[in-house]
Every structure is written in structure tokens, then in C-alpha cells.
Amino acid sequence: MNTIPEKNFLNATRGWKSWLFTLDHKRIGVLYLFSIMAAFLVGGVFAILIRLELLGPGRNLMEADTYNQVFTLHGAIMIFLFIIPSIPAALGNFLLPQMIGAKDVAFPRLNLASWWVYILGSIFAVISIAMGSVDTGWTFYTPYATETQTSVISMTLGVFILGFSSIFTGLNFIVTIHKMRLPGQTWFRMPLFVWGLYATAIIQVLATPVLGITMVLLILERVAGIGIFDPAMGGDPVLYQHFFWFYSHPAVYIMILPGMGIISELISTFSKKRIFGYTAIAYSSLAIAFISFLVWGHHMFVSGQSQLAATIFSFLTFLVGIPSGIKIFNWLATMYKGRITFETPMLYALSFLFLFTIGGLTGIFLGALAVDIHLHDTYFVVAHFHYVMVGGTVMAFLGGIHYWWPKIWGRMYSEFWAKIAAAFVFVGFNMTFFTQFILGSQGMPRRYYTYMDQYQPLHAFSSVGSWVMAVGFIIMGVYLFHSIKRGRPAGNNPWGALTLEWETTSPPPTENFVETPKFSHGPYDYDKNVPERTI
Amino acid sequence: MDTTATLFLPPGGSTIAGEVDALFYFLVYASIVMFGIVLAGMIFFGLRYRHRQGDAAAPTAGISHNTKLELTWSIIPTILVVIVFFWGFNVYLKMNVVPKDAMEIKVTGQKWFWTFDYPEGANTVNELVIPAGKPVKLLMSSKDVIHSFFVPDFRVKMDVLPNRYTIVWFEAKREGTHNLFCTEFCGTGHSSMIGTVRVVPEREYAEWLETASNVGSDLAPEQYGERLFVSKACVTCHSLEGKSVVGPPLNGVFGKPVALTSGGTVIIDENYIRESILEPQASVVAGYQPVMPTYQGILKDREIDALVAYIKSLQ
């Protein structure tokens, strides 16, 4: 019978101050976890409102101006407050030091600062809602963002501040991975989740400053009337798009790379099999990180950029697709001759493979110049990036949450309800977003408050899908929170995995390991070890 | 012949549409094959290597990699995407090389309507009339924020910018009407910034051009105004059922006083309506944003007279 260790990081110290000013990476990870869950809830409510308004053409629930604010807030909150910090800042923070056998990250104070900066940035973003909201779309395209009456400054200032939080986390992780691995754990004996975090951190540190500068320039233009992007003041609106996407395309990989890392862990653990092509997966993460800096122009094929530039960006875009494809095949091959079980985390991993493959393949459509001309700024693009962001990152995040939940709290959630919720989310997601591929290729433009009658049946179907997904998330919220106090104790290693975090207690002690861990086997040596499952 | 509508694509109405569709459907079928391989792999391995309770938990095979296999699944997709790149590039080139004999029409996008100026001096709002079987080049610019010109049936799209001209060209295959959408978010009326492209036979086009500047001369001013109210896009922002859209409703307002944002009050008479059409920011009704664009240069005096007469008649 498993028990919860008497002394662990959750009860080591007490009182709200011991949480808000903690230097323990695990507690900071938990703070982040609750913060991003709150952001996900708010962004999700906006998503449901969007789908309700689009149930039929014309006015259903709100005016056009309100709708424009709602879809802007959905995008801005989901991107900047939820999905960018989701895996690295919450799960990465909690797990990275444990996975490399360290007591903490390299700079615990910087780590705490990153959370506080995140909260400060979020406050600015939330204030903008109260101050009349923003109606520019999460991309803040100029000159619209220069001219609109809404509170663009507060929101962009929020985004600027949030960027620092992201940079702090990235910097911290790079140093931690370089300097704090336990003896014996060489680069190519690290878990692939750590490789994913490493590649992500590089992009966070190199790309985020460009977003910060762009936001400052936009604020200067609005406040001081300095003409940078607005042609009425002598600026160039397409320059803004170049700046914005120079960050925001690599940001897509900030979102997906750590998710890919989680998938490597899940597929290997639940197939009880050595990961296939470890080196290829590790290097493809780095390849994706570097090529991702060179493809931003594919968001701008119809923006007025030169045809030569568009052609070069199209070619590079196809190149960045290859390493992602390689990973998919590697994960599949990992299942070959495995000993596969289908607990909830594995269901999310398989959902990821299913949905991310569709997301990736539809990316090929959008990279092909002539086809993108037709599909750009339609619902096809909306469907594509939701398949990548939700079907990819969020599925990986949910898989990770269900996988490490017993490590964080020491207790199991209800496997039965978890499977039900996973089914609702998977079915609801496909209902909501697969229809949008058809809507888009039939010509339905995105960011439309109302639409022509011919698009109504598919829009209505998509809205019904969003309710199915919502039901899944509500069930998930209930059983997860219920399990924190009431779940049955999980033991050290409920899944029988080989990475280091499973060698310590659940929940771990503040210093992560009671005794200094020794590197005795690689993270995927299932050909030599059959770890005991504690549940 | 227009290509017919399919599950994914609307009917193609331009010469380029068939070529875009061919690549699109190649990608659809190639994607189905690739996705099928991944799905089949998941299902087969999942069933074949499923671990059941009670099975012995023995160590699994230590397959670390397989260079030949990995090269295969790297090189084949690379070849495929390079083919797709060149295919897409080839069609893109055709979309960008404007035929020398193309007729030119000036397009202006602004919140929230499209204006088309024809070489012979006619202009239309939200309806682009073009001859079938003749290449048409659009020289486009915006008066305010970025818009985007999108005709799904023609498979063409191009952003419309405030600080430079952008160009799009197409050749419609035969007569018919096609939707025109704005696809770059431009604010309150973004989803109402839609129009039509009407394709007519070449001879009919010449006749249309001649009469376009004299349309309505045979109608009573109120009836002409009623038609203009729709064709010049007033209806996008002004309701006739007393609802506030972007601008104030215009039914039953003539001759009544109205409060202004500047604080004063004005009686809505012929001169106020004329001023609001030509200098919309001069006296804005309280409770509304000063967002209406000027119609200076778009409407002729005769058309303004007709609109005044029409609004007067809405009692």
C-alpha cells in the first residue's frame, strides 16, 4: 500500500507567503500551473462566446464591436497567458531539475521573478479588458492598431512585460541544462523532454526581445505620434508585419517543441520501449529551432512583400516541416515491438499523433504559394493552427498533466473519468475544427462577425463541437481537483518509467531527492530494465 | 466551363482556378495517404503489441535506430515537398505576370466598402463589373487601414495597403456573379465589407460602361436614391429600421433635431445631409464614432440630390 511521504515540498512550509515567495522550482511550477489554468478558463469562455455568436449569421449574442474584442481577447490570452508559458513554465519548471538530478534550477530567484513578472504582465492584459478592451486581433496589425480607439497600449504593454517572464525562464533553463546535470548524464543521455525545453529556451531568449521592441515601437507610435508603421505619419505597415512575425513564427515552436518533448516521454513509457532514433529526435528539435527563424514571411504571401521573398520563404517553410515529420515516424516506430498500455496520458499522446499529423499536413497546403493565396486569412488557417496549437501543444500538455499529476500531488485521479473526458475533448475538437477546414477552403474569411447563409450549417456544427469539448474540460477540472486531496496515493513510480523524477517520492521532498541520485541507466533503457509499477 | 463546386472548393470562375484546384486536390490525396500510413501504424502497433493484464512484463527489444529506414522517411517526404514547392511556385508565377493586354480598373478599399473606377470614367461601389474572357488588372489602394481583396471563385487574394499600390489580375471565364470579401481585419464593419463581381459578355460590358454614368436618369429621385442607398454602401452602416449599426438609423429623422458630439443641436435638413455625405466629420451625431468616410469625388451632385430625396421620403 502506497503512502504519501510525511515531509514533502507541498507541506514543508506553510502559509500563503511560503508559496508566493517560494524559491522552490516545484512550487513555482505549481503557481504557474494554477495561473495558466485560470488563463485557459478565461480564454476558453471567450472561445465559447465566439462560437455562440457564430451559431448563425447576423447578431446572436453581441454587437460587432463586442465580438471583435472577444476574439481578440481569446487569441491574446490563449497565446500570451496560456500556451507560451504552459509547458515550459509549469511542467518544465516542476520537472527539469528532477529529470537531470538537480536540487533546483540555476537561478531560483530569477525563477520566482519570472512568475511575478508574468502576473504583472497579466494584470496589464486584464486591465485592458476593463478599460474598454482591444479589438485588433492578437496580431495588433498596423495601422489599425495605431488608429483604433480601444486600449491597445495596456494590452501591448502587458505583452511586452510577459516577454520578460518568458526570457527569464529560457535563460534559467539554458544555464541549468548546461551546468547542473548529474555526473554521468551526458547530453545524449538526457530525457528528450529536456532537449525540447532546451531548444525552446533558445528561441525564447533570441526571439522574444524582437517582440518586445516591436510592442514598444507600437506604443511610441500611439503615444508620441512617432511614425514607424502608420503611413499617415510616414511609416510602413508591412514593416510591422515583418517585425511581428519574426517573433511570432518562432513562437509557434516555443509552443510545440516542449510538447514534442512530452510526447517522446509518453510514447516511450507506455510502450515500455527504447525511443526510436533518439539522436534524430534531439537534433530535429534543434533544427526546428534554427530554421524557425527563417520562415516568418510565409504569413505574408499576400501582404505586398516581393514575389522573390515570398518564394524563398515558401521553400524554407517546406524545410521546417521535414524534422517534424521525422519525429512522427520515430514515435510510431517506438511503438513497434513495445509492451503498450493505454492509460490516459497515452490516449493524449495518440490524440497528439492523430491531430498533429493533420495540423502538419495542412501546413503544407499553406506553404504552397498558389494554394496559400486562396486559403490565406480564411477559416482554413484558423483550423490549421488550432490543429497544431490545440491538437499538438494542448494535447501534449494534457498528456503531461495526466502523466505527472501523481508526481506533483502524490495521488491518482480517476482513470475512468479521465478516459471519458479525453474522449469528449477529442471528439469535440474534431467536430469544432475539422469543419473549419471546409469552411475556409470554401472561402469563409476569418475574423467575421457575420457571414453569408451558405456557411451556416458548418458554422453551427462547429459551435456544437465546442460544447462537446467544453463538457470534456469541465469533467477534467472536477476529477483533477477532487484527486488533489482524495485520490489514492500513487507511489514513486505509478507508470513504471525510467526517467529520474520517478526515483524520488511522490510528491518529492523540497530538495527533490532524499539521497543524491546516481546515474545508473539511460532514460529509455527498457531493453535492460523492467521498473516496478507502484500502482 | 467553370469547374464545379466540390466538397472543399467553390466553383472556379477564373482561368487560374483550375490550376490552383489541381494542386489543392493533389495535396488532399497525398495528405490522405500520409495520414493513412500514420493512422494504420498507430492502430496496427497498438493492437499487435498491446500489453494485457497478466502478460509477462519482460524487457523489450532494444532497437535504438535504423539508418536506412530513417533516411527513407526523411528523403521521400523531402522529395514530395520540393515537388509541391515548384508546383506552387509555377502557378504563383502565372498569378503574378499580368498579360500586356489586360484592362485596368482602379480599386479603392476603405472602411467599409469598395469603390471601382473604370478607365472610361464610370465608378461603382461594391459591385465590380467585368467582361468575360478578358484579362483584368486591378490597381488597388486603401484610404485608411489594410484591407484585402478576395474573390474565392477566382482563387485570388491581395492585401490593399494605404501607402502603396498592390496589383491583382484574373480572367473570368464566363458570365455570372461571384462573392467579393475583405479578408484583412478592418474593424466594426469588416464582415459587411463584401461585394460582388459581376461578369458580363464583352459586348454587354461596353454597353454597361456607356450607361453606367447615366443610370437612374429615368427614375424618380426617391427611387434613384433608394437604389443608391444600397449600391453606394450607405446601407452597410445606416439602418432603416431604427437600429444603431455603425452610424445612426436614417428612417423618420428628416426635419427632426439631433444632438451632436460637439454639444450643439442641429435640425436634419437637406444641407445637413449634404454636409454629412461630403464632410462626415463636421457634425457627428452624439453617441457615434467619427468613422464615416467622405463621399467627395465618389458621388455626383445628381446622386446626392437623389439620396437627400430618398432620406426625406423615409417618414
Image: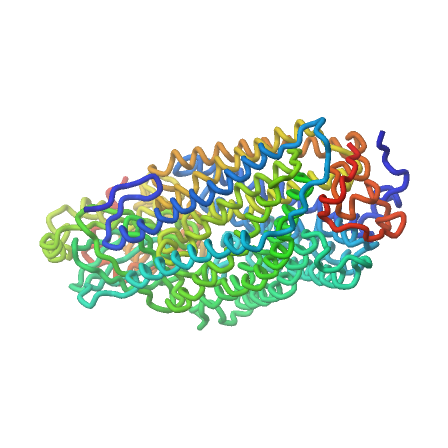
Q: Is residue A456 above or below residue B64?
A: above
Front in this rendered view, residue A403 or B38: B38
Q: Residue at x 75, y 51 (%)?
A: A522
Q: Residue at x 35, y 52 (%)?
A: A374
Asked if residue B155 lies left or right of residue B123, the reply is: right
**What is the count of numbered marks?**
0
What is the x, y in percent for residue A171? 71, 63
Q: Quadrant of the C terminus of chain A?
A: top right
Front in this rendered view, residue B231 or A254: A254
Q: Is residue A385 above or below residue A177?
A: above
Colouring used for the render:
rainbow
Asked if residue B49 lies left or right of residue A119, the reply is: left
What is the x, y in percent for residue A519? 81, 53
Q: Could one spot residue A483 in this view of the protein?
A: yes
Q: Quadrant of the N terminus of chain A?
A: top right
What is the x, y in percent for residue A323? 54, 56
Q: Could one spot residue B186 in this view of the protein?
A: no
What is the x, y in percent for residue A466? 52, 35
